[in-house]
Image (spheres, helix red, strand yellow):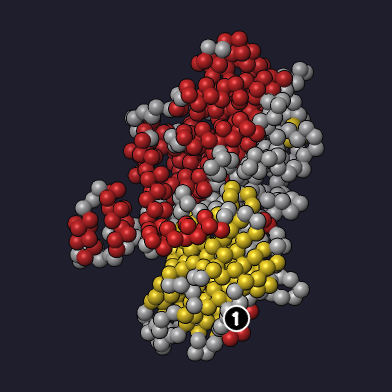
Amino acid sequence: MICEDEKGTIRDVYFPYVGLENHGNSIKVGICDLDSLYCSWLENWKIQQRYKSEFKENFCERILEISGENREVLRGKADTQEGKQEVPEACREIISNIGETVFESPEIGLKITVWEAVHPSVNIFYRTFEVTNTSNSIKHLRLFSNQNYRILETKIGETAVIDKHTLIHYKRDRYFLHASDPAFDQHAVGTAEWKGLEGTWRDMESDASLSGNPVAHGSVDSTLGWTLPELKPGESTRLHYWIVLGKKYCSVLQIHKRVKESGRKALFHHSFNFWNSFIERVAVLPEFSRVSQLPQSVSKCFYRSLLAVVAHMDITGSIIASCDSDIKQFGADLYTYCWPRDAAWVCLALDRARYHHLTAETFEFFSKIITSRGNFLHKYTPAGDFGSTWHPVPMIQIDETGLPLYALYNNWEIAKSVWTTGRYYRTLVIPTANYLVKAIDRETDLPISSFDLWEERKGMHTYSACTVYAGLNGAYELSRSLGDYDNADIWKEAADRIRKSILEKLYDERLRRFRRALDDPTLDSSVFAVWYFRILPPDDPRVVRTMEAIERELERPSGGIARYLHDTYFGYMNSWIICTLWLSQWHSAVGNLDRALELLDWCAAHAHPAGLLSEQIDDNGIPLSVLPLAWSHSAYILAVLEYLQALEKKEGGSCNYPEK
């Protein structure tokens, strides 16, 4: 997984897990005018970032094949007076995982467009640079790329070496090969960030030339240079550059050879075709016939969300909360962990969208990390190790056990896969359900006190109680489907006790709404769980009054919904994408479709230009905290599909999904 910052500098290079071992530090690009010897880093230019959405020339052929349109007819349309456009309509506004970054410097008279993609099945990162002379004079240029890694997350004991027409950085069994077409004609490797030595990029800045040093060790960096052909005003040239990642010197060389043999556009075609085929699966949904009725912004955000949540999944089944390393949570920690809660929400969304094969991988991950007591701890690394925590022993957030159990039941409810249910019945269902039964407080009939979903306070929280009820009720349904009636009776009785106690002890008659917790009357948007996990129907007066209070008292000037009254995390009562979507889901559930769509559109309007959703939005509409957040994207998938289901129901159709 590769991430770059808002300046177009690559900061995160995750390998071999999505979210674990971040070898990144800085990969940045610069250019020098060889006539004046003036050099500039692109990160200081005007920049636009997005995913590529329009395709030209023969790249468009695959899109036309998918659309079922005749490409010659479409090309003809593009040439007529009525449709004077360079790109056929079927090739516009496509959702892809090909990054497109445009750097512009009117002062220098250059525009550089970078297209980049990660291969879907091989450890290759591919970039194409298009350098365009936008000035009125002839340009003689040299392009540079500076690589500064932190292999195994330190600068100690690295090696960088030139091997013929490749550059290889390595430490232990982590290798990063760099090559290009055309091959680089300048290079330098040397010491960086050590005893006052800043790095080989200083060579570029001093005289637009590199020393040619072929090997360095310790705390190192490297710079590659390409002397470009002469560019007249308006002319462009392209350079193709790739990084191959692997665990052996010979293996990265072998993959590099395959890249050279496959052709310049092959990797982009592979990436586009793979992910386009991936999102085509949505066409099997009963709601799909209504997708065309969505505003384009909502539709694009929905498809981007599908790609975003899967980008956070590792082949082990782990789903990290966020790949954003720029944000440090609390004591200099990161979001690149798998929280069972966040992962379960992603499973709910992917199963709702019929990606059952992916959720099965996460259930397998759950089966490997579950404790001997039958519960899940705070968070885990993508390798399955227990992650860092700020919670004292026993480090429990009980919804992180209830929600994965409910997610497995949700998989059964939608997919009806006895194979998945049977496979994880003894490794997940029985231990988690039995743990949850034992975790019911005898005095209150609510789950024992634990940290809430916001990970801020201990108590007997409404949201947590609802997820435990949902998990136990789901376990009851699964046990009945497999004929385990003894456990079914136990789990059903426990679920009913919790539901009864939620209604009796967590609904506040004086406030005429649900409380955040048994000893905390604060209005909290997470109490949407009462209707979402089927404690009560969404149109029950107690639910209606609660959701109306959330909308009335937690709506912010920007139009989003805050977590709870007087929240101060990253500012005062910022809007949260997930909380805004919970309200949208409720409006869909009760038939207020205009308002539901308005909230969906609000979230899409506050996405990053690339379509990625953050955790929070401040009152000025600016994204805050992590970007992207997998939970925000999973909530968007659910909210859109539930809106479409409600739309189908309202307009006379039916969708074969259980009512929430």
What is the tally of numbered marks visible in this picture? 1
Near-viewer residue (442 or 412): 412
Crowding at mark 1 (Cα within 10 Å: few <14, some 14-19, many 20+):
some
Q: Quadrant of the rendered structure where residue 364 is?
A: top right
Q: Give x and y (percent) for residue 613.
A: 54, 51
Q: Is residue 562 visible?
A: no
Q: Is residue 80 visible?
A: yes
Residue with the most extreme bottom position: 35
Near-viewer residue (286 or 393): 393
Q: Secondary structure at mark 1?
A: loop
In the rendered image of this protein, does residue 438 appear above or below residue 47? above
In the rendered image of this protein, does residue 287 appear above or below residue 310? above
Residue with the most extreme right position: 392
Residue ID for mark 1? 211
Seen at 47% across and 44% down, the residue is 306
Seen at 63% across and 42% down, the residue is 383
Q: Amino acid at mark 1?
A: Ser
Seen at 65% across and 24% down, the residue is 432
Q: Give x and y (percent) for residue 133.
A: 41, 80
Q: Quadrant of the rendered structure where residue 169 is?
A: bottom right
Q: Give x and y (percent) for residue 157.
A: 70, 62
In the rendered image of this protein, does residue 138 appear above or below residue 466? below
Q: Quadrant of the rendered structure where residue 597 is?
A: top left
Left/right of residue 241 with respect to residue 44 in the rendered view: left
Near-viewer residue (612 or 538): 612
Q: Give x and y (percent) for residue 265.
A: 37, 61
Seen at 63% across and 76% down, the residue is 200
